């Protein structure tokens, strides 16, 4: 089950901010570029223990499957007091039982996690929340509206939110 009804079960997805940007662009003539988008693959739980099992605590995780998860910012964002520059980054995570470290890295055009810490440009610690939902399909989406919103990352019984604001 996935409580985020707007998502399908495709193996690859793109999340836009503003939410539903392609539809808004076609129907309402919104600006030419979104604020941000995330391109990622969506592995399925398939009865596996995800956190502390398939994904080891303290070890880097590519936030998805197959190609590296990519975020493209079409304008700078403010995250935890830092200005994250416009551009393309891969996202990865270092999960623990209580928090995740979300990493923006410039080693784009890679498959899997070709971790090169020298190309890490931003790191943000965020708390995790246990949820009663059993989220089968790994999910990344945007929640909220500008100027303040979240990147939601959810799988199995865990949700994490990275708050951001637009400039």
Image (cartoon, rainbow, N blue to C red):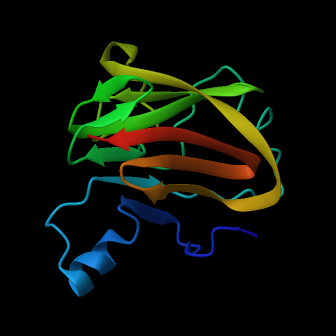
Tell me how many marks there are. 0
- Is residue 46 visible in the rendered image? The answer is no
Image location (x, y in percent) of residue 46: 77, 60
Image location (x, y in percent) of residue 34: 25, 60
Q: Quadrant of residue 18?
A: bottom left
- Toward the viewer: 49 or 29? 29
Q: Is residue 163 above or below residue 5?
A: above
Q: Is residue 79 above or below residue 17?
A: above
Image location (x, y in percent) of residue 16: 37, 61
Please identify the residue farthest to the front as the structure is shown. 147
Quadrant of the frame with the C terminus = top left
- Toward the viewer: 79 or 42? 79
Residue at coordinates 40% horizontally, 62% vertically from top-left?
14
- Is residue 15 visible in the rendered image? The answer is yes
Image location (x, y in percent) of residue 147: 36, 49
Please identify the residue farthest to the top as the structure is shown. 118
Residue at coordinates 58% horizontally, 42% vertically from top-left?
161
Quadrant of the frame with the N terminus = bottom right
């Amino acid at each position: 089950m996935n409580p985020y009804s707007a998502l399908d079960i495709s193996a690859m997805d793109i999340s836009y901010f503003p939410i539903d940007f392609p539809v808004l662009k076609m129907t309402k003539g919104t600006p030419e570029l979104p604020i941000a988008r995330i391109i990622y693959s969506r592995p399925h739980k398939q009865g596996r223990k995800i956190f502390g099992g398939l994904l080891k605590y303290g070890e880097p995780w590519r936030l998805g499957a197959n190609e590296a998860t990519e975020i493209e910012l079409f304008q700078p964002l403010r995250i935890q007091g830092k200005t994250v520059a416009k551009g393309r980054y891969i996202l990865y995570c270092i999960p623990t039982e209580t928090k995740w470290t979300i990493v923006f890295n410039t080693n784009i055009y890679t498959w899997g996690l070709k971790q090169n810490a020298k190309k890490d440009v931003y790191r943000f610690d965020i708390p995790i929340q246990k949820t009663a939902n059993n989220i089968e399909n790994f999910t990344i989406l945007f929640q909220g509206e500008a100027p303040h919103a979240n990147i939601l990352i959810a799988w199995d019984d865990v949700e994490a939110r990275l708050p951001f604001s637009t400039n």
